[in-house]
Image (cartoon, helix red, strand yellow):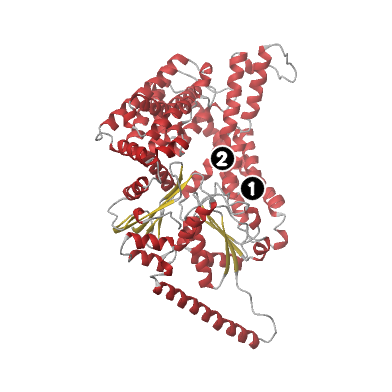
């Protein structure tokens, strides 16, 4: 491990009782060695990585890790806990904790060394030796690989015995196979072993990627399977030989980020799971892919689900899968909403409120007339809006069934517009299209037809089924529900409107760009995604955007008026939060919420609820779905609208300052500042702080 770990980075008596405390204790050792320049900033990055997926592994191992701009060089710290610390592993707490810190631009050589450690963690002899290490120096030497040549004769002997046993098994197996072949009536050669190719990857690409590879390779050897793994990690990856893929009988994807060049594996029995399943259930995955091969189950396209919006591990509940599918459609729809909405809003601003009655610019366009330009922008925006429901439906189906789902999804979305089923119809059409395609893909297909399935058979059958259901079976009920929702929005007045504004404000500030935030935003944009939205729909859009601007602006103001309550990194992030908040990018408050969620998120929700309620009470309207402060000229009652935002920002700022001030004199901020000043001032001057 080179000098990535020294005795000073080892704690054999780790007393922490939570994973956060363990990460802090080990990170403080990194700060003391000058390996980390900002303690709180680094821990926020560790927490963000932990939020993506727990880092606990079977066998009593925890591997919190991240890439961070606050790391000066690749570093590893090790802690041993007598009581055990919960890192989310299925088999219980971890007593061996490895904190891996990689710089944002770590070189491939260092990352390769870190990946070798990840593979060693799958070796019980290695972990047993760490559990019995007597002092920090010997533990560090063992992790670096130096002690393997000195003390661990038993380990080397065990490895030799294991190798000898493996060789003996191989030599015993070979004559057995030969004799079986000789006993056969025909001189056919011995049957070749089952062949599997696998791809492993994880969000950081440092630990889980290589641990899953090691686990799969070990399970393959035990099962007598030829298994070759392509690790798509941070240190880059070498593509499997096309001949190896062609000869494979099955494919295993153990990944939490998109598999690169996934089309290479099309047409083979495939098991698609999360990376932790590759670590914990490797033998089961091999058995599963063998079963699929025996039954002739193959993927017609590039995989059973899209790489980014795939259903995920088999352990995920239906609710989690449904959310991912819906968010797939929403994420592709939002750019159309933003472009179309802003163009329509600009058309009204330039051409007046009657611009929607203007003739087509194909028939009448005068270069020198403002009304003609307003009509042009309005009509382009209307065309862009025409794609919203088909894109929503198409990419929901894509999230469920990959590219074969696009055609029936778009067709179903277009039918939803035709029958006036609107946004709700698009949701239903996308889910139906994805389900139909997934059902077709499960049908056993003769090899001769596999080539035409994704381009002819699946689009034909799925589009016909989706069209029939949308036109004949469920179209009218959905259209009635859509009309009912539109009428309800149009009838909102007084107290009801204010309460709705407060609720939407709470949702916008709850997870700052997460699923709850997106539900509120999608609800608002669905209301204005028509040529002539109601006044109530435009009030809802205004309330949602105003509330979404509050958290980053409040954090920016708080770091300005009471900077001593925040770390140096947070004060730098506060400068960027001004621009992000003014631009309606709620994610600008995420660094603050990740570092101190119990104080920041409730404060933001109170301010957001106030802003949403005031915006509805003031009757502010907004035709554009995005733009922040830059579309204020397009807002109805803009002065009162800005007052609503200012009120929410002031309330959130006051609450954050009050709650942070109740702590003991900001020990974390003081410690982080002093540690960074003592250990990494020079490094900070040459390395900009990430905003």
144 w.r.t. 658: above or below: below
Q: Nearer the viewer, residue 51 or 518?
A: 51
Q: Based on the displayed image, in which of its 4 quarters is residue 646 positioned?
A: top left
Residue shown at 67% from the left, 80% from the top: 189
x, y (%) of residue 361?
72, 19
Disc 1, SS: helix
Q: Nearer the viewer, residue 287 or 683?
A: 683
Residue shown at 66% from the left, 44% from the top: 407
Disc 2, SS: helix
Q: Residues within 10 Å of mark 1 (few under 14, many from 20)?
A: many
Residue shown at 69% from the left, 54% from the top: 453
24 w.r.t. 293: above or below: above
Residue shown at 34% from the left, 64% from the top: 131
Q: In the image, which disc is placed on residue 329?
A: 2
Q: In the image, which disc is placed on residue 403?
A: 1
x, y (%) of residue 685?
44, 35
């Amino acid at each position: 491990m080179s000098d990535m770990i020294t005795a000073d980075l080892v704690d054999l008596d780790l007393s922490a009782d939570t994973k956060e405390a363990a990460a802090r204790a080990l990170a403080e050792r990194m700060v003391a060695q000058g390996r980390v320049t900002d303690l709180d900033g680094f821990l926020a990055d560790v927490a963000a990585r932990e939020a993506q997926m727990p880092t606990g592994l079977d066998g009593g191992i925890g591997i919190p890790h991240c890439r961070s701009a606050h790391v000066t060089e690749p570093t590893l710290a090790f802690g041993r806990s007598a009581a055990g610390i919960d890192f989310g592993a299925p088999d219980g707490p971890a007593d061996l904790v490895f904190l891996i810190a990689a710089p944002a631009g770590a070189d491939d050589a260092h990352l390769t060394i870190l990946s070798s450690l990840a593979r060693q963690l799958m070796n019980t002899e290695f972990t047993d030796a760490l559990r019995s290490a007597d002092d920090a120096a010997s533990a560090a030497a063992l992790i670096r690989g130096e002690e393997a040549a000195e003390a661990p004769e038993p380990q080397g002997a065990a490895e030799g015995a294991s190798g000898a046993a493996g060789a003996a098994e191989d030599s015993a197996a070979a004559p057995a196979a030969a004799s079986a072949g000789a006993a056969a009536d025909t001189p056919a050669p011995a049957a070749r072993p089952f062949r599997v190719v696998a791809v492993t990857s994880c969000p950081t690409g440092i630990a889980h990627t290589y641990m899953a590879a090691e686990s799969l390779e070990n399970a393959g050897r035990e099962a007598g399977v030829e298994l070759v793994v392509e690790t798509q990690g941070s240190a880059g990856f070498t593509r499997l030989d096309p001949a190896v893929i062609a000869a494979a009988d099955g494919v295993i994807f153990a990944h939490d980020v998109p598999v690169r060049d996934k089309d290479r594996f099309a047409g083979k029995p495939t098991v698609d799971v999360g990376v932790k399943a590759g670590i914990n259930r490797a033998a089961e995955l091999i058995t599963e892919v063998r079963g699929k091969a025996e039954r002739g189950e193959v993927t017609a396209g590039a995989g059973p689900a899209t790489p980014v919006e795939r259903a995920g591990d088999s352990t995920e509940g239906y609710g989690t899968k449904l959310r991912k599918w819906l968010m797939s459609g929403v994420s592709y729809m939002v750019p159309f909403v933003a472009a179309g909405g802003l163009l329509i809003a600009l058309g009204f601003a330039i051409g007046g409120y009657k611009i929607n009655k203007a003739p087509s610019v194909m028939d009448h366009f005068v270069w020198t007339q403002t009304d003609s330009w307003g009509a042009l922008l309005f009509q382009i925006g209307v065309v862009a809006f025409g794609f919203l429901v088909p894109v929503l439906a198409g990419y929901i189906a894509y999230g469920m069934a990959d590219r074969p789902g696009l055609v029936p999804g778009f067709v179903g979305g277009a039918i939803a517009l035709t029958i006036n089923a609107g946004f709700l119809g698009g949701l239903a059409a996308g889910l139906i299209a994805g389900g139909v395609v997934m059902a077709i893909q499960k049908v056993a297909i003769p090899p001769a037809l596999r080539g035409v399935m994704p381009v002819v058979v699946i689009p034909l059958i799925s589009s016909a089924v989706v069209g029939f259901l949308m036109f004949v079976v469920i179209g009218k009920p959905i259209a009635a529900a859509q009309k009912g929702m539109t009428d309800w929005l149009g009838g909102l007045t007084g107290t009801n409107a204010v309460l709705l504004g407060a609720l939407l404000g709470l949702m916008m500030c709850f997870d700052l760009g997460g699923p709850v935030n997106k539900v509120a935003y999608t609800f608002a944009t669905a209301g204005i995604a028509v040529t002539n939205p109601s006044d109530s729909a435009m009030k809802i859009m205004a309330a949602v955007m105003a509330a979404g601007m509050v958290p980053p602006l409040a954090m920016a103001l708080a770091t300005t008026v009471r900077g001593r309550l925040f770390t140096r990194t947070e004060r730098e992030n506060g400068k960027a939060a001004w621009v992000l908040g003014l631009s309606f990018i709620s994610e600008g408050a995420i660094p603050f919420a990740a570092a101190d969620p119990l104080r920041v998120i409730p404060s933001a929700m109170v301010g957001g609820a106030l802003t949403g309620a005031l915006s509805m009470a003031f009757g502010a309207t907004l035709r554009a779905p995005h733009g922040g402060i830059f579309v204020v000229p397009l807002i109805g009652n803009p002065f009162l609208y800005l007052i609503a935002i200012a009120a929410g920002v002031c309330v959130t700022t006051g609450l954050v300052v009050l709650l942070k001030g109740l702590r003991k004199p900001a020990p974390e901020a003081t410690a982080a500042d002093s540690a960074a000043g003592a250990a990494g001032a020079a490094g900070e001057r040459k390395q900009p702080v990430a905003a």
